[in-house]
Image (tube, rainbow, N blue to C red):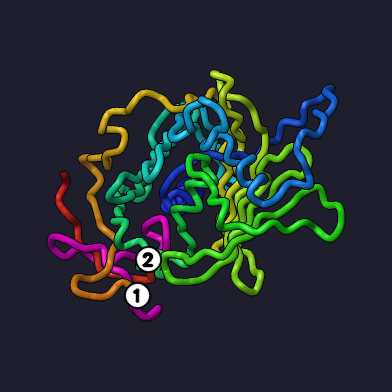
Amino acid sequence: MLRRAVAPLLIAALLAQCGCQFWSRFKGIGHSPAPCTFNAGATSQEVVAHVNRNVAPPDATPPLTAWRSTGVKMKVGGFPSVNGTIAVEAPHRLRIQAAMPVTQADVADIGANDEEMWFWNSQDKRVIAVKHEDLPYAMSQMQLPLEPEWLMEVLGVAPLDPGEFELVRPVTDAGHIDLVAERTMPTGQVVRRIVRVDACHGRIMEHRLETSEGDLIAIARLSDYRSDPSGQYTLPHTVDLYWPASRMNLTMRITGSITANPPAASDALWTMPNRPDSPRFRLGRPPGTPVRRSSMEQPVLRSGMEQPVLQQNAVPFDYGGSSARPFPAN
């Protein structure tokens, strides 16, 4: 059961690349709701500027380009939650590590640096790596929309482009307005990018990816907005990520403090783990093949000598039976 609990967590993070936005269960018992402060008649450029105020502040405040938290509860579906830490740094860096609450035994390690991303879980015992240049191929095989730019925006360290979005107000008073844009995924698929904004406080409620026909591809719901200890940035402290086609759901709830724009981390934070009991495998295009291939062809875990064929669900996503080749540790 632990493998099933951790697997969606690993998939959710490949997608690997960075930022912060979160959905909460805190209800503020006994407190009156804050008065509306957002100008509901704002233009699309004004709305984007408002939601970008952390990463593009209007004053002398430094933009938010990185954050870390060592107090995170992570939950996949109906499985028990695990303790975790998150570190993110624009434009590509991410590290999510999870451990059991009582024993503190490591159960997952997900990361990305400027060259590649990786996934490890305690049940499978393999470190799976994907170079950024192989991401379109990996996405086409995993049946999961791993859109790094989208995740960077969701996690709050990448600004929205004011020239990309159009403003759409609901026909009825639904309490929100939508910023809508078209975007091309790494696989070449054109999707609709929707940012749903609270019409009262101007905070992002949802990030959505939809097909051109309106079918939901992925959604991130955000809430529990609070100021960081410095008081300069307002960040959501719970995010619920969901991919309907894969039935993958990941909730991350920050229970500790967020350190915004922390001092530069050591290279070790952004380095793929070197575990003696965990061989490394690279998921990528077979050598000499183009990026886009038939959906009937299978990805290859390559480099080094041949290993037994991977079985379905042996790693955090379904390879459909592919050849495995380890590659040397760094």
Asked whether 328 or 307 is in front, the reply is 328
Total numbered circles:
2
User: Outermost residue, top direction?
Assistant: 230
In the image: residue 170, left or right of residue 78: right
* Residue at horizontal 48 percent and vertical 24 percent from the top: 259
Q: Position of residue 81 (x, y in %)?
A: 56, 37
Q: Can the viewer see residue 99 in this picture? A: no
Asked whether 87 or 320 is in front, the reply is 87
* Residue at horizontal 31 percent and vertical 44 percent from the top: 113
* Residue at horizontal 33 percent and vertical 50 percent from the top: 117
Say which quarter of the image contains residue 288: bottom left
Q: Main secondary structure of the magenta part?
A: loop
Task: Report which residue position mark 1 lands on.
Answer: 292
In the image: residue 28, left or right of residue 70: right
Q: Can the viewer see residue 270 in this picture? A: yes
Residue 314 in the magenta stretch? The answer is yes
In the image: residue 324, left or right of residue 175: left
Tell me the tag on residue 101.
none
Mark 2, secondary structure of its residue: helix
